[in-house]
Amino acid sequence: MIKFCGNCKVGAETHEIYPGACPFYEKAPDRHCANHRLLPYKPIDGRMVYIASAMRGDIEGNLKKAAAYCRAAAEAGTVPIAPHLYFSAYLNDRIPEDRAAGMAMGLHILRRCDELWVFGTPTEGMKEEIKQAKESGLPTLYISEDTVNRILGTAALTAALV
């Protein structure tokens, strides 16, 4: 029997309400949302999770958020992959050719990941990542705004303590 994730309080019924992935899913060792397909993998290998989050606009602030999302994903037992974190070291998102190259390389990496986790409202680039994941049959998890805010609040508290 599938136990509910603890966020939406309806478990298997979320399949009707949220086709695809339940936006309230939160990883827990002994339970999962009915919509989150558990993948067969060896625990020592870890699941590679592609982190989709905003880049444009406040680039510096958005990169800090991406780092916080990666930390949360790693703490959940996954191997987080956020290409925009390291592509930004040598590509300039404000230069169209650099942005196109970064998006193409990111989509290439996405095809090799086990899941896509979407943080925040999807931007133009994130929508391309979601489209690629859907075409590839990759499980996509939409992280709720409440969870995003908790992650960012924890990251801010940690930074203040350092």
Image (cartoon, rainbow, N blue to C red):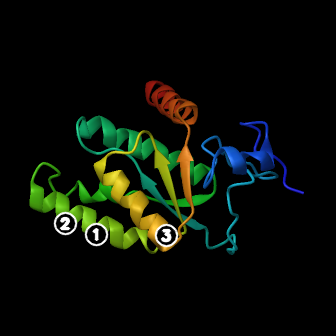
Residue drawn at the location 14% of the way across and 60% of the way down: 98
Instruction: First in sequence, mark 2 or 3: give its number.
Output: 2
> Which quarter of the figure is the N terminus placed in?
bottom right
Q: CA distance from mark 2 to mark 1?
A: 6 Å
Q: Are marks 2 and 1 in contact (CB under 8 Å)?
A: yes
> What amino acid is at disc 3?
Cys
Point out the residue furthest to the front here: 16
Instruction: Determine contact: label 3, label 1, CB under 8 Å.
Output: no
Secondary element at tag 2 = helix
Could you tell me the amino acid type at mark 1? Met
Say the numbered circle drawn on residue 113: 3
Up/down of 61 relative to 38, above or below: above
**Residue where numbered disc 1 is placed:** 105
Q: Tell me: residue 110, above or below residue 53.
A: below
Relative horizontal placement of residue 100, taking residue 162 as reference (left or right): left
- Quadrant assignment for the C terminus: top left
Residue 16 position within the rendered picture, expressed as x and y whole percent measured from the top left: 70, 48
- The residue closer to the viewer here, 57 or 21, is 21
Name the residue tied to disc 2: 101
User: Residue 77, position in %: x, y?
Assistant: 63, 57
Residue 101 in percent (x, y) is at 19, 66
For image coordinates 56% across by 53% down, the residue present is 141
Residue 47 or residue 6, whichever sits in front: 6
Q: Position of residue 126 (x, y in %)?
A: 36, 52
Q: Amino acid at mark 2?
A: Ala
**Residue name at image x 64 percent, y 40 percent:** 24
What whole-number distance in Å separates the C-alpha atoms at marks 2 and 3?
19 Å
Instruction: Classify 58 as above or below 71.
Output: above
